[in-house]
Image: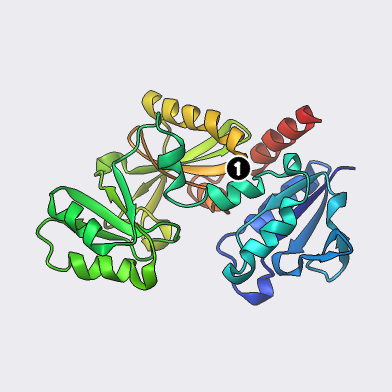
Amino acid sequence: MPRVAFFVSDPSRGQPANDNHLRLPQAFVAAGWSVSRIDHESLAMDSRRVVARDLAGSAVAVADFDLYFVLGFGSQATFLDRMQLLRSLDQDRFVNAVDALVYQHGKVSLFLAAHEIPQPETHVSNNPDALAAIVAGGGDWIAKPTAASFGRDVFRLRQGDTNRRAILEHLTRDNRYALLQAYIDPGGEGEKRTLVAADKIIGTYGKRPVDHRGNINAGAEAFHTTLSRDETATVERLMGRLDGLGVRFASIDLVGSQALEINVANPGWLATYDQVTGVDLTPKVVDALVRRFQLRE
């Protein structure tokens, strides 16, 4: 029986952002896999072996698994140390490789790595003067952290806004980097979020924002929709790049045919789609991943 290890945050430390830590393991069990859920923070090295403990407290030899599925980043303070430990394992067994988790999460990597994908104009800096000068030059902009989630600290800025400097100083406090992205009005179609797994489009739902943020956590309304031909072309072109970057499970946000960002950490797509449509597409994800990794073997 093949074995898959899920690296998750221990629920006793706080409420998970979504139910992927339950939904995905259950689907793998139904597909005939043995499943272990491993606490992110239990990873360690013992005599050149990577070891850990599962959520039941049992010791686990991490190298013994056929597939690794990292859900979320765990504690920011320990992230890089844990990624170094996981990087020592066979990266061809990772749903999303360690390099993808380190380098492809956030709003910057997509713009730099995929020049041929239609995307809104984007700037990144930790200099509030440089960002303020761009806004002062005209246009409609979204300012936000480069790798935040849930619609936190997302602002819409225009030339005449008297508080634009204060907002940009807030985003770049302590020398942090901020992203400035041209705002695209989603109109009646709304934003669209598509889940992809192993070069397969799993499904799409739409998001109607209540303000400039398309995040469900910020009050956006989710609804069932499909991709147009141009939108499908953008997603397919992105999928052609993602596997080579070590990304085999991600959500892609679009406005029209333009890609806004990808989420490789732990996209909470499956539960939202289930709520909107009454259809659980988790088995479809597992089938796509199993086919991809079994073909590799």
Q: How many discs appear? A: 1
| Residue 274 seen from this side | no
- Identity, as a three-letter code, of the amino acid under mark 1: Phe
Residue 234 location (% of width, % of height): 42, 29
Which image quarter: residue 210? bottom left
Residue 249 located left or right of residue 57? left
At 46% from the left and 45% from the top, the residue drawn is 109
Residue 174 located left or right of residue 32? left
At 37% from the left and 48% from the top, the residue drawn is 207
Report which residue position mark 1 lands on: 249
Q: Residue furthest left?
A: 160
Which image quarter: residue 115? top left
**Which quarter of the figure is the C terminus placed in?**
top right
- Name the secondary structure under disc 1: strand
Colouring chosen for the image of the structure? rainbow
Residue 85 location (% of width, % of height): 74, 58
Compared with residue 158, is residue 115 higher up or lower down, i.e. above or below? above
Compared with residue 132, is residue 242 higher up or lower down, i.e. above or below? above
Name the residue nearer the viewer: 21 or 65. Answer: 65
10 Å neighbourhood of mark 1: few (<14), some, or many (≥20)? Answer: many
Name the residue nearer the viewer: 118 or 17. Answer: 118
